Amino acid sequence: MTQTMSTNSSLAFTRLNSATLLIHLSGCWKITDNLPDAAEVFKHIESDPDIRHISFDTHDLTEWDSSLLTFLIKIIDQSALKKVATRKDGLPPGVQRLLTLARADAAAKEALQKPAAQSFLYTIGSGALVFMRTAYEMLDFLGEVFLAFTALLRGKARLRGSDLLLFIQDCGARALPIISLISVLVGLILAFVGAVQLRLFGAQIYVADLVGIAMVREMGAMMVAIIMAGRTGAAFAAQIGTMQTNEEVDALVTMGISPVEFLVVPRMLALVLMMPLLCLYADFMGILGGTLVGVGMLDLSFGQYFQQTKAAISLTDISLGVAKSTVFGLLVALAGCLKGMQCGRSASAVGSATTSAVVTAIVAVIVSDGIFAVITDIIGI
């Protein structure tokens, strides 16, 4: 037997057999003491290549703290590199549990750093399961929204009128500055691009037709939808997601109040009501931006530009844009509220839900606009 002594702790070695080294730990192992060095153990392992197992004897161990865990982890890691197995059954139960937790945490970090490669079929199957689960959750949410609006029409929905007015203000008046800026710029860009080409043929007057029809039929509703997706849809997801994190949604359920009726319906109703008005306002600001280019660059009078725009735009074009904006508003509100209700219980989950809401809303708006284009072409509008 060989032995190394310190002030309050001791470290000794015994060979149980040719392949097993028994380490005796005794005394008080605390970080404030002069503890033995793990290098002593490594010297024994390196000096005898026949050692294949390490065991511990702690019958004489009186006190210990994290310094003992650090000592043992160094031994276990170094032994593993030399292919020497370490047996923990001789350690105190508390030390064994802490070592298990420490190794599990290290394994989890390693798993995060080096994700295991999955087969192609596994990837396809996982994607299919995620898609099915997402589709089920979306259909379930749509069903709850339908029932909530049915209760609203019957006058039995549990929501506050003050919340609805607050959301109307947020979705309407407070969105006017950004919509004004973007719409005027879009009108300017459309007019400038059209002027560069039409001026080659002496047809500058048709810039009014280009800007008017593009803004009223497509760009007005589309730009408002994208702006509201990034502004209001993200806000809806963040607000409801934060409520999920703080367990406020669970509190509503506990009190017997439907979260869809109390949280989702007023937000959706406010955005759907405001979108047509915002679309008309965006159409006007876009045409105004085109007017600035037509009058300033193309030497057209304001009267000429106004009359040409009036002749080019029909009530059908305006109605189509307003109808699109209503559908776009519904999609943006659905995406924001759905992602908020699906949010997890952490701050990072709120950020992920917000990002997902914006992406989902924009994709849904563009896809629905393509569907509108096909339908209007079929019916000849």
Image (tube, rainbow, N blue to C red):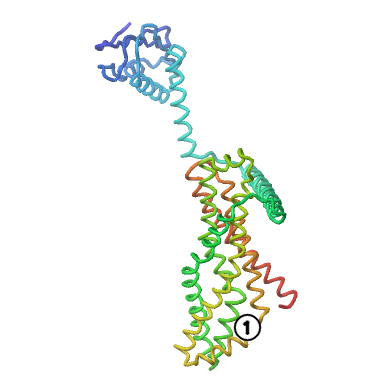
Residue at image coords 53%, 38% = 116
Q: Is residue 158 above or below residue 279?
A: above
Q: Quadrant of the N terminus?
A: top left
Task: Identify the residue under disc 1.
Answer: 313
The picture places residue 64, in percent across and down from the top left corner, at 35, 15
Left or right of residue 366: residue 54: left
Residue 267 placement: quadrant? bottom right
The picture places residue 262, in percent across and down from the top left corner, at 61, 49
Given residues 52 and 333, the one toward you in this image is 333
Badge 1 marks a residue whose secondary structure is loop
Residue 61 placement: quadrant? top left
The number of numbered discs placed on residues in the rendered structure image is: 1
Q: Amino acid at mark 1?
A: Ile
The picture places residue 184, in percent across and down from the top left corner, at 48, 76
Given residues 380 and 47, the one toward you in this image is 380
Q: Residues within 10 Å of mark 1 (few under 14, many from 20)?
A: some
Residue at image coords 55%, 69% = 223
Given residues 109 and 360, the one toward you in this image is 360
Q: Quadrant of the C terminus?
A: bottom right
Q: Is residue 238 above or below residue 171?
A: above
The picture places residue 206, in percent across and down from the top left corner, at 57, 88
Given residues 44 and 36, the one toward you in this image is 36
